[in-house]
Amino acid sequence: MARRRDTGDEPTLVWERPEPPSRPAPSPLSRDRIVRAAIELADAGGLEAVSLRKVAAALDAGPMRLYGYLSTKEELLDLMVDAVYGEIPTPEPAGGDWRGALRALAHGVRRTALRHEWFADLLGGRPNLGPNALAHLEASLAALDGVPGFGGIDAVMQASYTVHAYVFGAVRSEIVNSRAERASGLDEREWQATTGPYLVRMFATGRYPTLAKVVHEAEHPDAETVFDTGLDQVLDGVATRLDGG
């Protein structure tokens, strides 16, 4: 979460802090330009590629100039996360189709995280309070609030949390697996050929009959189908809490 900064008056978060006056030389800066440069670095090299010094260099500016726009790297990460939340389409008011609204938001998170893999590393931590993140959370809660038979706002909050927990966990797992595959230099078929003999020996011990059944008999659909099926199961669970199911 972006830190509060004492200005002599009431402390403010970075979202409410005004930017310094623009300067045409030696290179113009703004929070938006800083955040976009940081996102490009993170997209290319992960979060470890992001620092105030590297962002300043990408913008042909001195690092100290950036401190007029933000105070810490933590604030920069908060701004980056909120900018990416802004890429997730917010569905129209649900009109009773709470499943459709939550499904659209969930797939929006997944697609956006696949474009910006570092985004998954920052999901599920302390709530982000930027305007785009708040709009995303508002849409999730509003999809459930007032649904007939759903109960009060506490039930709405719990259901929204449950869906978010699934989405964040599934997206992070998918991206971690993708990174591991790239790091190994092996595609799925090559990885199976490498690990197959070991698994055959382990299954032959008889200690893992259900796991062997999964490996040999399960369908193993693509990642999007796995995500969508799991999301349906979570939404089915939410639906059971409605009066009358």
Image (cartoon, helix red, strand yellow):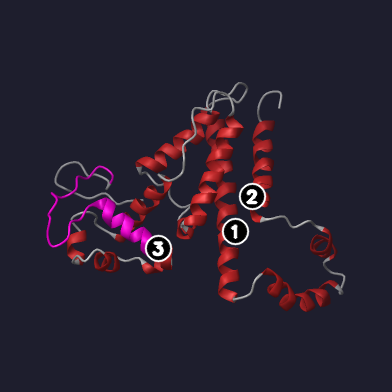
Q: Is residue 180 left or right of residue 19?
A: right
Are the residues at dot 2 and dot 1 in contact (C-beta closer than 8 Å)? Answer: yes
Q: Relative to residue 113, is residue 148 depicted above or below? A: above
Sequence order check: which comes first, mark 1 or mark 3? Answer: 3
Rounded to the nearest angstrom, the CA distance separating label 2 from label 1 is 9 Å
Numbered range of the magenta stretch: 15-41
Quadrant of the image for the C terminus?
top right
Q: Where does label 1 land, which residue?
A: 174
Which is more toward the observer, 24 or 61? 24
Q: Secondary structure at mark 2?
A: helix
Sequence order check: which comes first, mark 3 or mark 2? Answer: 3
Q: Where does label 2 land, which residue?
A: 227
Residue at horizontal 13%, vertical 62%? 26
List x then y, in percent, for residue 110. Answer: 54, 50
Amino acid under disc 1 = Glu
Give residue 42's mark. 3
Q: Secondary structure at mark 1?
A: helix
Q: Secondary structure at mark 3?
A: helix
Amino acid under disc 3 = Ala
Q: Residues within 10 Å of mark 3 (few under 14, many from 20)?
A: many
Sequence order check: which comes first, mark 2 or mark 1? Answer: 1
Rounded to the nearest angstrom, the CA distance separating label 1 from label 3 is 18 Å
Amino acid under disc 2 = Phe
**Residue 184 placement: quadrant:** bottom right
Residue at horizontal 12%, vertical 59%? 25
Give residue 196's mark. none
Residue at horizontal 45%, vertical 34%? 138
Q: Residues within 10 Å of mark 1 (few under 14, many from 20)?
A: some
Which is more toward the observer, 53 or 30? 30
List x then y, in percent, for residue 202. Answer: 81, 75
